[in-house]
Amino acid sequence: MKIHKPLLNGIASSLALIFNENRYSDKVLEKLFKQNKQWGSRDRKFVAESVYDIVRHFSLLTHLAQTKNNYWFITSVYFVLKNIELPAWPEFKHVNKEQILEEYENVRSDFNTFNSYPEELAEVCTSELGKEKWEREALAMNTLAEVVLRVNTLKTNTADLQKKLLAEKIETEKLKDNENTLILKKRANVFSTAAFKEGLFEIQDQGSQQIVSFCKPEPKQFVIDSCAGAGGKSLALAAMMQNKGRIISMDVAQWKLDELAKRAKRAGAFNIEIRLIDKPEAIERYNEKADLVLLDVPCSGLGVLKRNPDTKWKFNKATFEKTKELQQQILNDHSGMVKPGGTLVYSTCSILPSENEEQIKNFLQKNNTFVLEEQRTIYPSEGFDGFYMCKLKRK
């Protein structure tokens, strides 16, 4: 592909926002494309893939470029590794292709640099998972995540959705283990499709969908999704419950709940009630009332690095420790909403035991009214995102 300066400027300016101003890649690119509506789909694809790939392999590229903030030069090193021909521009006159490729081979022996994981993160992961498991998962998390669709069974079925998407030139294939899940054969902008606007599907990774299946919600139950965010799991719960029963979707962020309301309307999920957690009473009012409480708690996000590679550059131990304290606090504060005989499901998008099994162990030591029924970790090396889920029964 021929490189044009506006595209390269877009890549470099995006990287500056991501690394200098701590922005998130998806939001940066969303704004960039709105500002450059003249770019065609091929140009947008090139810019987006380049930005995500550079973010994913940032420490390797900065090592080879010998700079951490000359984003033009870092991008040129990336192009060399991708075997993309550099234009004869003054900005590229100091790029030494042979030297870059030679050092690329030399640095292979340094696992964390070559695979672009910051030292602090690698230390924590190696300590918790062991060297062999960490390196296996680290390699898996550097791969590109597939685009996975959850069929909204409130409005359609898998076969009909496939036909509708195919009419818009989007090919999908069924996931063997889940009849209501489709995977895109080729990446495409599914948000512009009529099927999306009609609420026939949601983008939701298979691992995230499995958490909802793990909950085993039943129609007519009273369910609380207590860290609902923008509502991906609430919508899946509504579909599994066939729009029956009652779902309370709670969160501390009003803007996320506003997004949930829009998504629920589009999906036709009418058994969802939205509640802002703005004071302790918002939780206490449901004391011992819920058949099922889902706690998809805030976490390090290390299980979803395929999808959010910039997360690894935002990791630090101090924040990690505070996040674990928050997880335990949420477990303690929200578990009271489960009625006797009811179910509590704790989940994270992390693969680290200190956020998962150890949190449950600590909780059970202090709360003898709950018993462990089942727990499972899905690892990125299994093909999708990484998640942990645990089911507790209240006596």
Image (cartoon, grey):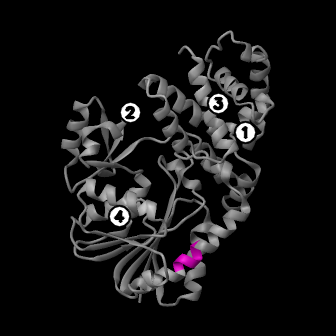
Residue at the (68%, 23%) spot, across then down: 76
Residue 276 higher or lower than 6, as above or below: below
Task: Return the x and y of residue 319 as percentages of the image width and height.
Answer: 68, 63
Q: Which residues are magenta?
A: 327-331
Amino acid identity at mark 1: Ser
Q: Amino acid at mark 3?
A: Ala
Q: Earlier in the sequence, mark 1 or mark 3?
A: 3
> Disc 1 vs disc 3: Cβ atoms closer than 8 Å?
no
**Mark 4 highlights which residue?**
234
Residue occupying the point 73% across, 16% down? 92
Q: Residues within 10 Å of mark 1 (few under 14, many from 20)?
A: many
Name the disc covering residue 366, or none: none
Give the residue pinned by disc 1: 59
Position of the C terminus, as image quadrant, is bottom left
Above or below, 281 relative to 49: below
Asked if residue 278 lies in the magenta stretch, the reply is no
Observer-side mark, 3 or 2, equals: 3
Asked whether disc 2 touches disc 1, contact meaning CB atoms under 8 Å apart, the reply is no
Kind of residue indicated by mark 4: Ser
Q: Which residue is mark 2?
A: 188
Position of residue 137 measured from the top left corner of the image (x, y, whole percent): 60, 49
Q: Earlier in the sequence, mark 3 or mark 2?
A: 3
Could you tell me which secondary element the residue under label 4 belongs to? helix
1 or 3: mark nearer the eye: 3
| Residue occupied by mark 3 | 12
Disc 1 from disc 3: Cα separation: 16 Å
